[in-house]
Image (cartoon, coloured by chain):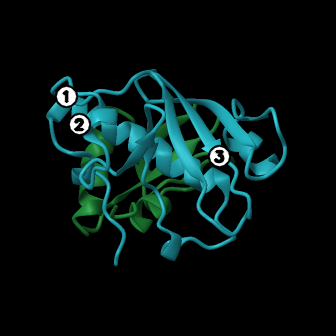
Chain colours: A cyan, B green
Amino acid sequence: MDILSRYFPTFFLKDSIIPGHAVIEGTLRSNVGNEYLVRLHVPADLPNSVPIVEMVSPVLRDRFGHSLVDLGTSYPMHLLKPENGIVRICHYSASHWHPNITFSKVLLKIRAWIEAYEGHLDSGYAIDHYLPHMEA
Amino acid sequence: MEEKDLKSVLNHLTQITQGKTTTKKLVFDPRTQELVLVDATAPQFSPDAVTADDPTRDGFFAC
């Protein structure tokens, strides 16, 4: 948590400390000052698998007014299938994950996703216009 | 000179996504929580700043 608190001081471990049940939650703020509550699920086999990252609030909509939850799995918007009505970001694949990737690096990617999301709201381009897909 | 307006940041991300070389680098400043564009050859922007280019270049899972 030391590196995480250095770069993302609003993020804290909530409730359980048991991997598989623990979540880390905090706020990311875009350059224009919009705030997003982000939840990171600590995997049971930490650090060997990809943590799930959810955008808890606000309710995210695309430029055309559709809820991102309703988009379901979205290749161009880098979204996984939502769970419990909450958007999940498609950040690392299991095949590209390795145990030395830190939560801070994951959150940096989410921070870039937020800026690209706001770009989408402004321009209408899908998020993958701004953020590339991983090599297969 | 640093830039942090949405248009400049997005132009930079688009260039990375298109595989183009850039004269700027995107860094994350933990003090302000901002993504800031700085000259790639400039001295370190801030002792705490970290690159946001590398995780971006990694790409996002093609789900």
Mark 2 and mark 1 on one chain? yes
Q: Is residue A35 above or below residue A132?
A: above
Q: Chain of mark 3?
A: A
Label 3 – label 1 distance at C-alpha: 28 Å
Q: Is residue B39 above or below residue A120?
A: below
Please name which of the two marks, 2 or 1, marks the residue nearer to the observer.
1
Question: Which quadrant does the N terminus of chain B fall into?
Answer: top left
Tell me if B59 is positioned left or right of A123 in this view.
right
Please indicate, yes or no, whether residue A107 appears anywhere in the rendered image.
yes
Q: Is residue A55 above or below residue B16?
A: above
Q: Which residue is mark 2?
A: A120
Q: Which residue is mark 3?
A: A41
- In this view, the residue in front, A35 or A70, is A70
Tell me if A102 is positioned left or right of A3 in this view.
left
**Would you say the residues marked 2 and 1 are in contact, meaning their CB atoms lie under 8 Å apart?**
yes
Mark 3 neighbour density, 10 Å: few (under 14) some (14–19) many (20 or more): some
- Check disc 1 and report its element: helix, strand or loop: loop
Please name which of the two marks, 3 or 1, marks the residue nearer to the observer.
3
Q: Amino acid at mark 3?
A: His
- Check disc 2 and report its element: helix, strand or loop: helix
